[in-house]
Image (cartoon, rainbow, N blue to C red):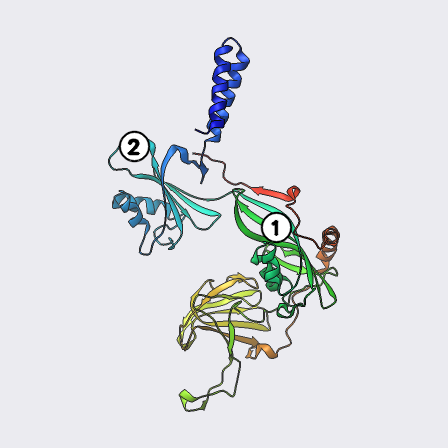
């Protein structure tokens, strides 16, 4: 027991014996004991782990829910019942992923038994979300999210080499660099050609789990960039609450985004362009037009939708292998071939930048890449030679709301000086706690 806590207990006991008749001292004693007990709680996943024996592990290759429970003395008839009861909440029998952590809780009541059996299985889908399957008395399965705290912060920087190094020197997340370069200013600034002396300010939100575990940059509220003598503003604003579409606009309400991304992978290289006159030695130099644009990337690299749209095909066919096709509007359609697997289904609405699949080698493919095909008015064309439209402008009905929202945010951005990153703004801390049941 720590010396400080021991000292508190000795003091309480001394006061109690010296003042047995003093009711206020007894109340103080009870209060202190309660505080100490509360302090010793180990709260996680909605349970006080102090009340359980517990075992932590990760899903290994070849592990299944049944194998894990059998390894911990649960028989197969019981495993089947648990899996069947839980599958409407989470199909635990098929959805365990290698490397994901899990926790088994054991009752302390049966600690003396030679064979201990778990009473609860907790599977962590990611840092935030987890699934609880409790089979102590009756079988219960439910999903929960850990308490999340959002903390708004500000940062500034002056470019000496590139934005990644600038943020690294300040101890800031590289995700912030990706958001500025890929999500916000991708169409207005060439980040490969930043100049020494270019500088930026940003208001962003960091995410923490259980107030302590850093879970990365949640979003960027506003940003300002000085580049080549231009002053560029960006303000985040939701334009469609039903589809959760968020864009960045400048101080004049102009959308900073273009309708299409330049390429469907962040980390890849252009390996073969659209070419109607292509001849290949392997086929005796016969004319074999290439109506796609190939981007080479390692197997498993995420493939992104280059624009908002609806998935019209997500299937496998012939030389295309596994692919996804997206209809963006009456004019434009895109297709993404040779995937290792798809991440979306037919009929699903996707936003620009959403992951729709992963690079593979299915179909006719000499190496891992994505073949990106682009249709305009029903005809396949070279996307690099199209004068592509800008993203949908903010509607007239929302423009007034946007300008009112933007004014105080711009004022705050203008009042940030180009110094070291500012401290946490405590007033802008929001905690989401959707778990109140402690067992």
Labelled disc at residue 110: 2
Classify mark 2: residues with Cα within 10 Å, few (<14), some (14-19) or many (20+): few
In the image: residue 35, left or right of residue 205: left
Q: Secondary structure at mark 2?
A: helix
The image position of residue 318, as x and y in percent, is 40, 76
Q: Residue at x 47, y 21 (%)?
A: 9
Give the quarter of the figure containing the C terminus. top left
Residue placed farthest to the top in the image?
A: 21
Q: Nearer the viewer, residue 232 or 25?
A: 25
Q: Nearer the viewer, residue 63 or 308?
A: 63
339 to 5, vertically: above or below: below
Q: Closer to the camera, 214 or 364?
A: 214
Query: Given the current orientation, which residue lies at the most extreme front position?
Result: 3
Measure the alpha-carbon separation of dots 2 and 1: 46 Å
Badge count: 2
- In this rendering, the answer to whether 234 lies above or below 41 is below
Query: Horizontally, is 293 left or right of 107 in the view?
Result: right
**Residue 238 drawn at (x, y percent):** 64, 55
Using the rendered image of the protein, determine whether residue 289 is visible from the camera's viewpoint.
Answer: yes
Report the residue at 64% width, 49% height from top.
153
Residue 425: give its label: none
Position of the N terminus, as image quadrant, is: top left
- For label 1, the crowd category at 10 Å Cα-Cα, with few meaning under 14, some 14 to 19 and many 20 or more, is many
Can I make out residue 241 in this image? no
Residue 59 point in image, percent of width and height: 36, 52
Residue at image location 58% in from the left, 72% down from the top? 332
Query: Marks 2 and 1: CB-CB under 8 Å?
Result: no
Q: Which mark is residue 205?
A: 1
Of pointers 2 and 1, the one earlier in the residue sequence: 2
Judging from the image, what secondary structure is the residue with disc 1 in? strand
Q: Looking at the image, which residue sits at the far left? A: 114
């Amino acid at each position: 027991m720590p010396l400080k806590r021991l000292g508190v207990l000795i003091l309480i006991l001394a006061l109690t014996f010296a003042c047995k008749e003093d009711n206020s001292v007894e109340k103080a004693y009870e209060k202190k004991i309660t505080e100490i007990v509360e302090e010793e709680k180990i709260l996680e996943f909605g349970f006080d782990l102090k009340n359980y024996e517990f075992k932590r592990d990760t899903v290994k290759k070849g592990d299944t829910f049944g194998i894990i429970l059998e390894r911990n003395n649960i028989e197969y008839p019981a495993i089947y019942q648990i899996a069947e009861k839980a599958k409407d909440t989470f199909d635990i029998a098929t959805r365990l992923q290698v490397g994901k952590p899990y926790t088994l809780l054991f009752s302390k009541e049966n600690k003396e038994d030679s064979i201990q059996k778990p009473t609860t299985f907790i599977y962590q889908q990611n840092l935030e979300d987890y699934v609880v399957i409790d089979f102590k008395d009756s079988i219960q399965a439910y999903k929960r999210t850990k308490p999340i705290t959002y903390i708004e912060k500000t940062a500034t920087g002056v470019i000496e080499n590139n934005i990644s190094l600038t943020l690294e020197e300040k101890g800031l997340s590289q995700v912030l660099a990706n958001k500025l370069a890929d999500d916000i200013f991708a169409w207005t600034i060439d980040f490969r050609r930043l100049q020494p002396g270019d500088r930026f300010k940003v208001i962003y939100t960091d995410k923490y789990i259980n107030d302590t575990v850093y879970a990365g940059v949640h979003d960027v509220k506003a940003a300002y960039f000085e580049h080549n003598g231009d002053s560029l503003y960006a303000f985040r604003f939701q334009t469609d609450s039903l589809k959760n579409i968020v864009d960045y606009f400048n101080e004049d309400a102009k959308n900073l985004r273009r309708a299409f991304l330049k390429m469907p992978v962040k980390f890849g290289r252009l390996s073969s362009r659209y070419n109607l006159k292509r001849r290949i030695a392997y086929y005796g130099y016969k004319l074999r037009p290439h109506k796609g644009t190939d981007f080479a990337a390692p197997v498993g690299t995420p493939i992104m939708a280059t624009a908002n749209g609806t998935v019209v095909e997500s299937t496998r066919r012939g030389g295309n292998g596994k692919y996804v096709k997206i209809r963006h509007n009456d004019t434009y359609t895109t297709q993404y071939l040779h995937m290792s697997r798809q991440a979306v289904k037919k009929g699903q609405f996707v936003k620009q930048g959403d992951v729709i699949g992963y690079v593979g080698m299915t179909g006719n493919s000499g190496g891992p890449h994505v073949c990106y095909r682009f249709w305009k008015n029903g005809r396949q064309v070279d996307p690099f030679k199209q004068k592509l439209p800008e993203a949908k402008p903010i509607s007239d009905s929302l423009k007034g709301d946007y300008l009112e929202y933007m004014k105080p945010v711009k004022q705050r951005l203008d009042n940030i000086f180009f110094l070291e990153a500012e401290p946490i703004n405590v007033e802008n801390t929001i905690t989401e706690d959707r778990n109140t049941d402690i067992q």
